[in-house]
Amino acid sequence: MSKTIMIVDDSASLRQVVAIALKGAGYNVVEACDGKDALAKLDGTKVNLIISDVNMPNMDGITLLKEVRNRPDLRFTPVIMLTTESQESKKQEGRAAGAKAWVVKPFQPAQMLDAVAKLLPP
Amino acid sequence: MSPSPQTPFPAFPRSLWIAPFSIAVLAAALLFASNGLSLYTAFQTLVLVIAAAASALVMTRHAQQSLGSHSAAAERACAECRAAAPVAISNLDGFCTNVLPVWARHIESARSQTEEAIVALTMRFSNLVQRIEAAVQASQSATSDMGATSTRDHSILSLLSESQIELHSIIDALQSALQTKERMMQEVVSLSSFADELTSMAADVAAIADQTNLLALNAAIEAARSGDAGRGFAVVAHEIRQLSNMSRDTGSRIREKVRVINDRLASALDISRRYAQENAAVESRSEATIREVLSRFERATKGLSESSRLLEAETTGIRDEISNMLVSLQFQDRVSQILSNVRDDVEKLNQRLASAAVADENEADTPDAMAWLDELATTYTMAEQHENHHGRNAAASSDTQQITFF
């Protein structure tokens, strides 16, 4: 059974790009446009990994990450931050909140798939 | 620009006193030199001093009046400037309050239009990738169905190989049939040799019949000589002659039948030989045709396989190119963030000016530029924004970066 990955980003085009890469590799994909939307969708969907942007309206990625870590069913779900933020301080903020990897846009789909494969062993 | 400090004008400037008093002193010296020291000369000198003082006083008054009028004009101008400055700032506020929202709307419009276009473009490219993927899979599935093996080349080549084996087995069957016919012809030829023997035997039968007939004739002659005693023997001799005649007839019929059979066998042999030659030619032509067909099929298969592989490689290349284009389209996210930051800052400035105008319409609250820029810098997310902020050359970041694992 293929695994499900959630993409959280306010940019629809970027969600598309990530979805194409992941679907091509055989993953199921669930899309959310911000942190709040993601939390709402996580209530009814079992996901194996979350890829989230940092700067988003309504709820940013770091807040979403903290919320996810506070939920018992999602405490150990790996989260990859996909963002234009390249500042070390922001990275460390993500690390402290429980992110497993930090990917700076623009990204290569192959790199992203490698990161996903590392965090989601078969 | 800060106004220069005003310096008060002196009521009696020394420069205005020097000229009249110098003339008066010079005139008194000339009087004393020409007239000598006397009461009249002293009186004249006093008059000159008074005249010089009066002249100086008059000139001073004139100067004061002139400078006073200039000073008043300057003061009026400064007052007008001071009065005009708040008006200009107030006008700038009004200008900004009206213009900034338009700028913000234009920026937002550009940002949203770019985003919509890129999303639509991404969707189309995404559909293209999916369709190409489906075409590649359908092609691979179709070619793998052609044979038991999974790869296309193997399946087509194995099909060709199987066809060759089957068609060669048909050629072998034809050759086997021809060989069987050859053996049958040899049997027929051997039968014709038996026919000769039968003809000889028929001749032997005829010869025996003739000899028997001659013998019976002699017996009949001898029986006739014997008279009544030989009458019975004459009957026997007669019967023997009839039998010998019958034997001769039978021998003739046998010889005739053998001849007919021999002719038929020769005819059949001739026909069989002609058929055998024709069959051999047909078999040879069939084999050549089959080999030619297989050769063509092989060439066509190789060509098809090559073109199919090329098509698949090209299709895969196009799919990869489109995927790379999708990666390049990520620029929209970065552009959107930069435009959003500028839009937000323009809106913030507009709100600031609007709230300042409400607080005090007469006093403009000009924001501190450095503090404003520092605050703007905190909203940046990308390195090129910081580079732009500091006026350095900010190249668009199209290179992907390494992933950081925690």
Image (tube, coloured by chain):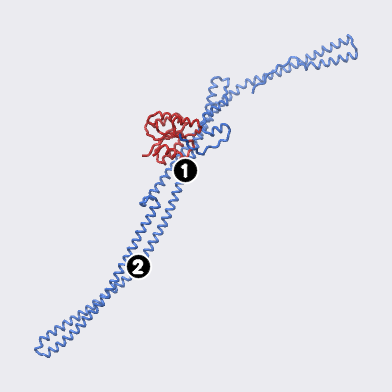
Chain colours: A red, B blue
The quadrant of the rendering that contains the N terminus of chain B is top right
For disc 1, the marked residue is: B322
Residue closer to the observer: B77 or A65? A65
Is residue B189 visible in the rendered structure shown here? yes
Q: Is residue B160 left or right of residue B258?
A: right
Q: Is residue B183 left or right of residue B67?
A: left
The quadrant of the rendering that contains the C terminus of chain B is top left
- Which label's residue is closer to the chain start, 1 or 2? 2
Disc 2 is placed on an element classified as helix
Mark number, residue B178: none
Which quadrant of the structure image shows residue B15?
Answer: top right
Q: Is residue B222 above or below residue A108?
A: below
**Number of numbered discs present?**
2
Instruction: Name which residue lies at 47% across and 44% down.
Output: B321
Q: Position of residue B365 (x, y in %)?
A: 57, 22
Q: Is residue B391 above or below residue B250?
A: above
Q: Is residue B90 left or right of residue B71?
A: left
Q: Chain of mark 2?
A: B
Q: Position of residue A34 (x, y in %)?
A: 44, 31
Disc 1 is placed on an element classified as helix
Q: Of all residues shown, which one is farthest toward the top?
A: B39
Q: Is residue B289 above or below residue B143?
A: below
Q: Of all residues shown, which one is farthest toward the right?
A: B35
Q: Chain of mark 1?
A: B
Q: Position of residue A86 (x, y in %)?
A: 50, 33
Q: Residues within 10 Å of mark 1 (few under 14, many from 20)?
A: some
- Tags 1 and 2 in contact by the CB under 8 Å rule? no
Q: Is residue B198 left or right of residue B222?
A: right
Q: Amino acid at mark 2?
A: Ala
For disc 2, the marked residue is: B280
Q: Amino acid at mark 1?
A: Ile
Q: Of all residues shown, which one is farthest toward the front?
A: B406
